[in-house]
Image (cartoon, rainbow, N blue to C red):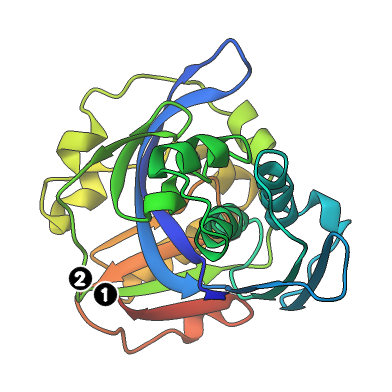
Amino acid sequence: MLLYPNAKINLGLNVVERRTDGYHNIETVFYPIGLSDVLEIEPSETCMDYSFSSSGIPIDGDPEDNLIVRAYRLLRREYQIPPVDISLFKQIPFGAGLGGGSSDAAFMLKGLNELFELKITTKKLERLAAKLGADCPVFIQNKPVFATGTGNVFTQIDLTLKDKFLVLVKPDIHVSTPEAYSLIIPENPEFSLRELIKKPISEWKSLIKNDFEKSVFIKYPAIEIIKNNLYDIGATYASMSGSGSSVYGIFESKPKKTELFEGCFVAGGIIE
């Protein structure tokens, strides 16, 4: 079975409250984009548990710590799942605020559910995904949503960026999510993002913000420069995604200049 776990961007991100469990309540809009990894899952004929191989962007660390393997382990504790061979072609960069690892894990849950006919409901898949990471549940249904809580309470929204052109830029900078949160002072916004997102995209620049940008830009000014450059080449709206370090620009059509981003990971295309 071949799966294509895709990335997401955050359209706005407000950190509204610190929770007693150490996490934060947020509000954001998750929007799926086309940049994806390639995940292959097959029943194994040779191993007693699982095999895991990867290519593309190098993956460091013990496979047991990988969210894909953790998703497999999570389901295997409750369901009769045979050994599997797992292969990942990694294209979504790490530490970018794009949810690549979370997407891989969610697609692993969905893939195993389909491959072995486990008949797990969507709601249960979302609950299982939440055990793996805060961003994981959104990739179960994998459509634009207004998210609250830790990013796991979803409200469907009527929003499409279809036929806009997206440029995604990630510098060679890793932003620590715990550190980014530690620099935030939670605050309820004057106007809910759920309402602001209904405004024309041409008005988003002055209305919709990412709370992480203020502190991240101070420590990593190169990320702010990327955002400004996206506006300079014609973006209607530009923002950091999640806690960074990637920045995206939404354009009415393909920009003519992208050489400003030499040395960065750059991806782009028409939003479908």
Residue on which disc 1 sits: 272
**Is the Cβ of the residue at disc 2 closer than 8 Å to that at disc 1?**
yes
Q: Is residue 21 above or below residue 69?
A: above
Q: Quadrant of the C terminus?
A: bottom left
Rendered location of residue 179, percent (x, y): 68, 35
Residue holding disc 2: 162
N-terminal label among 2 and 1 = 2
Horizontal side of 132 relative to 191 (left or right) equals right
**Is residue 67 visible to the viewer in this orientation of the structure?**
no
Number of numbered discs visible in the structure rendering:
2
Q: Disc number at residue 230?
A: none
Tell me what residue is drawn at x 47 percent, y 73 percent. Answer: 35
Task: Give the secondary structure at mark 2.
Answer: loop
Q: Is residue 86 left or right of residue 22?
A: right
Dot 1: element = loop
Indicate the amino acid at tag 2: Lys
